[in-house]
Amino acid sequence: MKKKYESIISLGTKNSYPNSQNKKIRLLNTYCLIWGQIVLFFYSLEMIVGLVTETIKQRTITFDFFNLNPFFTYVFIISSLISILFLNKYFHFKWARFMFISTLIIVNIYASLITTPGCYIEYYFVLISPIAITLFEKKITSYFFLAISFLCFLTPYYFYVVYPPDYIDRLIILETACVFLVIHLLLNYFKANNLKFETLLELERDKVLSDKMILEKQESELRELSEFKSHFFINLSHEIRTPLTLIQGYTNQLELKKSDTENTQKVDIIKEQCQQMQNIINNIMDLSKMESKHFKLISTDVEIGSFLEKHFVNFQSLFSKKNIKFTFNNNTLKTTILIDQELFSKAITNLLSNALKFTPTNGTVSINTSFSNEGLKINVIDTGIGIQKEDNQTIFKRFYQVKNDITKSQGSGIGLAFTKSIVNAHEFSIDVESSFGKGSCFSIYIPNIYVKTITDKTLNTVITPKTNIIENLPKVTFKKNNKTILLVEDHKQMRDYLKKILNNYTITEAKNGKEALDIIKDNSFDLILTDYMMPVMDGESLVKQLKKEQNKTPIIVLTARSDQQGKLSMLRLGIDGYLQKPFMEEELLMNVKNSISLYKNVKEFDKVNTPEEVKNLNVYADKFNTKITTYINNNINSPLLTVDNIAEYMAVSRSTLNRKVKSILGQTVNQLIQEARLEKARNLRAEDPFATKKQIAEAVGITNTTYLFEKLKERYGI
Ligand code: ADP
């Protein structure tokens, strides 16, 4: 109903009309509606009254509408009003208002002179001038209608006399004239005031509109600027990558030749700085990737306890190196949260890296989890240098760093901005509470809708959460087996964690390289899994010693981020695999499984010969091995490296070569070439993270890049 009224009232209005014009049109429509309703009401009333009287009089019901006195007047009014609305509808407002005023005058004259003379109907003429004031712009027009209406008022008294002459009181007529005039003047005054007010409002509105336009323009300029800035950083990062790759490549070469300690230190510093630059670039690229329109989280339910435990274990050695007490208090058993594991891991890593950086020696850092009414809370609390109150929010802005001795030499101010972006992308929130000089507490709040309690049924699948990377890996079945692994690791928690992952193998533990060597003297293993950094004897010395003793047990080394330099020298010693912490469980399991199965053949060969024979054969085999592997390595970039080439070089027939290689190395020649190519490709990836897939494929003499990377995935899980 309200809508219907509204649509009638706005008949004939247009957006292109000035406001004042639309207002007049709406007023005229409103007058028509009101008048129409009044007429209908009175008509119905009169009809009912007429009917009732007739019925009482004649005791019969007659519907004689035409006998009802004002019928024609009502019909005239209603049809005029409808015509006025139609005129408005078709945008003839000028005619419409003229018709309205004319109808008013005609109906009034008709009523006051003909239908109901002597009933003071002429007093209604007082309405004409106020209505004209509201419908006409010009003052003169309103005065004209004032004059007309007053003349009409006088008609029954002087021109078409309906009152007896002695009835006419001039004083009253004069008073009425005054009333006409006063009403007219008052309304004109209000109209002028209203107009003034409206003009002011209009001006104000124009100002607001122009301010809004300026703001919108500034906003779009800012957006453009920010896009430009983002693009600039991305382009710059891409540009920096190339020289950085070159610097890293040449530094690696320098490292090979380093002789005196002074140069060694310098090379190490260059490498460390390169690594830092690489991290900054990676963060910038990740951040801009997140800001892109196509960015999407790949979220899965992840068991929060194991997820944080992994980070706790990975950081433990770094904290203990700085003599910081590091603890993990998990109060959220059997709980999963919906996260993009890879990204969220970066957020937690950033918070822990900051805690490590800004907490002095002998401090404490802890990761705590707890429930609240709203959801789950993860706290990273440190007793570090703290943050001033005014910096509490700005530290989350890009490139913002609080000026102090630590930030002077380290960091870029991107870490927390990246962390906040990740947290917000998950629809979680992050804040910090800090006391300057005493410590900080960073809290991530995870709303209840993203938190689930797991039932025992789902627990197993959750501990090894699926990510898109894991999904892409070939599925490996890990059955309980009788294979043995020597686990060399100084941190008990890390050992426990690894044991948990490798629960299908029989594990023997050693706390450092020396303990491991003692155990190996009396036992043989299918695999040695060792940490790189350890007290008493580190991983590198352990590997060197084992190689010296010609121990062929496959070795996988675990390296922390800070051990990057050591990683390459380890690879050169000929280890079977390395894994950088934090690693994925599946990646570790894949490496372990492949290394053990490759080694199986070599071991079987050793088993069927006497120790003396094995020793003699070993000397021969070593020579043979060195010769063939050197040849393969020197020609590895050639796609033409074939069994025939090698047979020619080794001066034997193709079949003899195959037989010898099989008996000494437990592999066919083609497998040997393939293995060498895969290993070289893996090392190239480690040495130069920016090398393209095509470059790597060319460097190892494989033309089919996809094939190479499929094989790498199969072999090393990378
Ligand atoms: P960066 O660490 O690379 O400087 P971040 O964005 O990670 O950049 O941090 C921004 C700033 O916030 C840092 O420069 C530091 O001043 C402050 N900050 C971050 N974490 C801590 C912390 N745990 N204790 C004290 N200050 C911190």
Image (cartoon, helix red, strand yellow):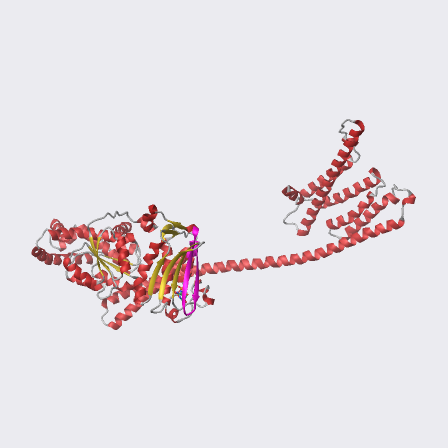
Relative side of 168 to 417, left or right: right
Depth check: give the residue in front, 295 or 253: 295
Q: Residue 422, position in %: x, y?
A: 41, 56
Q: Magenta: predominant secondary structure element?
A: strand
Relative side of 690 to 374, left or right: left
- Queried whether the magenta region covers residue 492, the answer comes back as no
Q: Is residue 453 visible?
A: yes
For ligand 1, the image quadrant comes to: bottom left
> What quarter of the picture does the N terminus occupy?
top right
Q: Is residue 340 above or below residue 42?
A: below
Depth check: give the residue in front, 96 or 636: 96
Relative side of 692 to 597, left or right: right
Q: Which residues are magenta?
A: 423-448
Depth check: give the residue in front, 215 or 450: 450
Residue 152, by quadrant, is top right
Give the number of callouts: 0
Relative side of 671 to 171, left or right: left
Residue 200, by quadrant, is bottom right
Q: Is residue 300 above or below residue 113?
A: below
Q: Is residue 498 above or below residue 50?
A: below
- Queried whether the magenta region covers residue 439, the answer comes back as yes
Q: Write the residue at 68% across / 51% down.
A: 20
Q: Residue 374, position in %: x, y?
A: 45, 54
Q: Residue 147, position in %: x, y?
A: 82, 49
Q: Is residue 699 visible?
A: no
Depth check: give the residue in front, 55 or 107: 55
Q: Residue 145, position in %: x, y?
A: 79, 48
**Farthest residue, direction right:** 166
Q: Is residue 73 above or below residue 541?
A: above
